[in-house]
Image (spheres, rainbow, N blue to C red):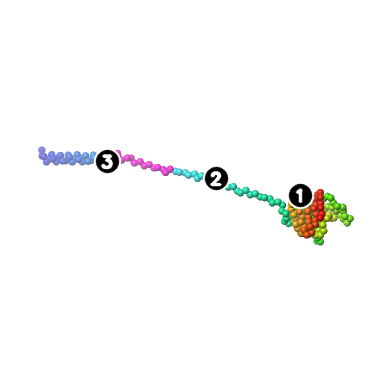
Amino acid sequence: MNVRRVASIGGVTVAVLLLAGCGGSDEEAQTESVAAAPPTTTTTTAAPTTTTVAPTTTTTTSEPTTTTTVPEAPTSLVDVPYERNESYYFTSPDGQFHCGIVKLPTRTEAGCEGTTDPVPPRPDDCVVNWGNGIRVENEGEGAFMCSGGPVYLSGDETAALPAGSTLSKLGFSCTTTEADVTCVNDDTGHGFTVAAGSNETF
């Protein structure tokens, strides 16, 4: 056998073995590489949902307490509802006496009508109703009335003058208590006090 040919065959054999070895190594390497690579796992982690509940705030609003004080009866009253045609009419608190501060053509007077006791004797010159009322005029002391009929009725429903009140009009002042009525001429100081069981003129 030719030595050159054997050497050539041997070289070819070695080359084939080397290629086979290289090929095997690449496949194994690829196989090892695939086996060694960890499996790809896609994990989606949802962000935790946080629900915040706002605290409930209860507000209690206390309104200030308003205290209404009813004032006592005033010492001087307004014209309404006492005024009627330039005169002023009222009743005693208990309604037993009808009173007025009255402007007449020739004079102004204050008086009250109602049943009172005692009553002085009727004067000789009085031929009509006597002792049913007392008045005080522009001049002179208070005196019982001699009249032909009611004098201090306004024709409308007359309001009471509350106890402890004073009505001052046309130069006269009338003051009430629970028991009586007193009317005075502001200039002269003369007048009267009248009640169901008593009376006084001055």
Residue 158 in view: no
Quarter of the figure with the C terminus: bottom right
Tell me if residue 201 is in the magenta stretch: no
Residue 176 in view: yes
Foreground tag (1 vs 3): 1
Task: Report the number of discs.
Answer: 3
State which region is magenta: 31-48
Left/right placement of residue 171 relative to residue 11 reads right
Q: Amino acid at mark 1?
A: Glu
The disc label shown at residue 30, or none: 3
- Distance from label 1 to label 2 (Cα)? 55 Å
Residue 48 % position (x, y) = 43, 43
Residue 155 % position (x, y) = 78, 54
Nearest to the observer: residue 98 or residue 182: 182
Residue, disc 2 = 58
Foreground tag (2 vs 3): 2
Q: Residue at x 47, y 44 (%)?
A: 51
Residue, disc 1 = 178
Q: Secondary structure at mark 1?
A: loop
In which quarter of the view is residue 10 placed?
Answer: top left
Left/right placement of residue 44 relative to residue 189 reads left
Nearest to the observer: residue 162 or residue 159: 162
Q: Secondary structure at mark 3?
A: helix
Q: Amino acid at mark 3?
A: Gln
Nearest to the observer: residue 59 or residue 133: 133
Q: Residue at x 30, y 39 (%)?
A: 36
Q: Earlier in the sequence, mark 1 or mark 3?
A: 3
